[in-house]
Amino acid sequence: MAKMKVTVIGGQGAWPTADAGCSGYLVEASGQRILMDPGWATFQGLLRLADPLEIDAVLVSHSHPDHCADLLPLLRSRALSEPAADPLPVYAPAGALDHLLASDAVGAVQRAADLRVVSDGSKVRMGEFDAAFAELPHHVTNLGVRLSAEGTSVSYTGDGGPDAAVVELAADADLHIAEATFAEPITGEDAGLLTDLATAVEQGAAAGARQVLLTHLWPGASYDEIVQERYGHSSPLVAVARAGMTWQAPA
């Protein structure tokens, strides 16, 4: 049986670049495909990995478009196929997708989503996957998630400031996908509501995660150089999210 696999579709924060979309991660295990955060400019990348009709569920951390905008083309591709696909289970905080779905006048698109509200502490069984959600500090309601299947666990913060809940969410995870928007310490209105690179690594290490994947990267910042200099020989392993990269659970 194939082990859990995570593919980065996009890992940019704020806006997509010429080379990469915003947040988007495909998690596969036991023949199931779970899409986490279909952000701006991730749908084309998803098409290179899977048929839209083969997506079993979508998890949306919060309402910001760099985490959910490309849910619309995914739903359109399913709603307007012949025959139309069954409604797609979409797990999201209450109200997080209302404006996005209302922006598409095609009624079939709105009906293509089977919206399922989750909140802090929610636990959901999705086929072979167990999902546990935890609210993390952000400008809007943001839910981190921990996916477990086949004895493997992957945690993902969405966006979220430093918090004990992050360490709990990522406890002993095989892979911790951590928002690290800024390469340097955060000041101003984002302080406490987003996470810098060093803090993201520190929280992953405190959680005992085996690998930390830094994502939601500020376009143009030199994350690779910083990571190599600071964490080239550290534990946990630290990597920078790049479109197309994959992680496979150890055998």
Image: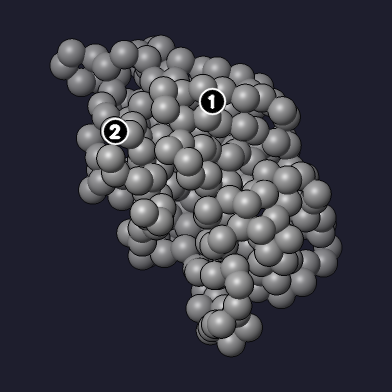
Distance from disc 2 to disc 1, alpha carbons, whole Å, reads 20 Å
Picture coordinates of residue 183, whole percent (x, y): 65, 73
User: The N terminus is located in which quarter?
Assistant: top left
On the question of residue 244 being in view, the answer is yes
C-beta proximity under 8 Å, tags 2 and 1: no
How crowded pointer 2 is (Cα within 10 Å; few <14, some 14-19, many 20+) is rated as few
Color theme of the render: one colour
Q: Residue at x 36, y 54 (%)?
A: 251
Vertical position of residue 140 compared to residue 10: above or below: above
Amino acid identity at mark 1? Tyr
Number of marks in the rendered image? 2
Q: Furthest residue to the bottom?
A: 229
Q: Earlier in the sequence, mark 2 or mark 1?
A: 2
Q: Residue at x 55, y 18 (%)?
A: 116
Determine which quarter of the picture holds residue 140: top right
Picture coordinates of residue 48, whole percent (x, y): 23, 48
Q: Furthest residue to the left?
A: 82
Say which residue label 1 marks. Answer: 91
Q: Residue at x 66, y 58 (%)?
A: 208
How crowded pointer 1 is (Cα within 10 Å; few <14, some 14-19, many 20+) is rated as many
Horizontally, residue 7 falls left or right of residue 83, namely right
**Front in this rendered view, residue 221 or 172:** 172
Picture coordinates of residue 21, whole percent (x, y): 42, 55
On the question of residue 103 being in view, the answer is no
Q: Which mark is residue 164?
A: none
Amino acid identity at mark 2? Gly
Q: Which mark is residue 31?
A: 2
* Secondary element type, mark 2: loop
Vertical position of residue 52 compared to residue 234: above or below: above
Vertical position of residue 84 compared to residue 134: above or below: above
* Secondary element type, mark 1: strand
